[in-house]
Image (cartoon, rainbow, N blue to C red):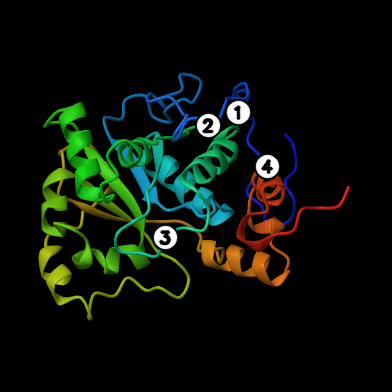
Amino acid sequence: MPVSPAGALPVVPGPRSPAPRSYDSPIPIPESQLHPESPIPNPQSRLHLYYGGTFDPIHLGHLAIACAARDELGALVHLVPAADPPHRPAPGATAVQRARMLELALADTPGLVLDTRELRRASHGGAPSYTVDTLRELRAQLGPATPIAWLLGADAFVGLSSWHRWEALFELAHFVVAERPGVPLDLAEAPQLAQAVQGRWAASAGELGTTPAGRLWRLHQPLRGESASAVRSRIATGGDWQALVPPSVAAFIARECLYGSAQPSS
């Protein structure tokens, strides 16, 4: 098995990377992102698991969370990059660039796949990207009885009450919350959310596969210090950043001169 650099995730042999694609269209990745060569860790799992985020850029912390969710919940993890989110500043990379970085990062990681539905929806209609719309689309696609879960970080979860039609989210999906360093899962300053989640915490991860929506689960994973803002800041200030992202993503960032990076001299 190949050996990863110090601090990086283990390199797990996976499916052969797909052939290069043309990136002339707004969102060129095919609508169906379910790769047959990316096996579901538990073939008996009924749970459909989605990991939403800006991924600007995708980094090793994101991958650690996704892999932990894949292993703990026994489900294929669909990473769903957001369009320019209405509740956060616009991302530093374009939608196509963020999708390409995700595709590169996921190419050799079994059980993680890319889902560009939010980017495609925004490119066609130009409407704001809301999670509730994505979950409604998934619910219509998968049916009323299919268990669906949305994976997000603790920092995003504690601010859930600021999201568009946030109370309806619990009718559409379960939520899997990944803790992050320095961001305790404390709802003391979010009384509306604290009240809304009372009685929703599942006693076991398996519960999420037995009902369609409405439960919460705290993901068990080692806390890692990477963040997209730290990656962008280090790039902009000339600091060391390459070890925070997969090598293929680092090469893409340098090649595209993203986040203030300089084109490497030949």
User: Which comes sooner in the sequence, label 4 or label 3?
Assistant: 3
- Pinpoint residue 29: horizontal percent, then vertical percent: 46, 29
Q: Secondary structure at mark 1?
A: loop
**Quarter assignment of residue 180:** bottom left
Q: Amino acid at mark 1?
A: Gly
User: Which comes sooner in the sequence, label 2 or label 3?
Assistant: 3
Nearer the observer, 196 or 80: 80
Residue located beneath label 4 in the image: 248
User: Which comes sooner in the sequence, label 1 or label 2?
Assistant: 1
Q: Amino acid at mark 4?
A: Ser
Image check: 221 left or right of 4?
left
Residue drawn at 31 percent across, 30 percent down: 45
Q: Residue 214: which numbered mark, if any? A: none
- Whether 212 is drawn above or below 238: the answer is above
**Quarter assignment of residue 76:** top left
Residue drawn at 45 percent across, 35 percent down: 26
Residue located beneath label 2 in the image: 110
Q: Amino acid at mark 3?
A: Ala
User: Which comes sooner in the sequence, label 4 or label 2?
Assistant: 2
Residue located beneath label 3 in the image: 90
- Mark 1 or mark 4, whichever is nearer to me: 4
* Badge 4: residue crowd in 10 Å (few <14, some 14–19, many ≥20): some
Q: Are marks 1 and 4 in contact (CB under 8 Å)?
A: no
Q: CA distance from mark 3 to mark 1?
A: 33 Å
Residue located beneath label 1 in the image: 14
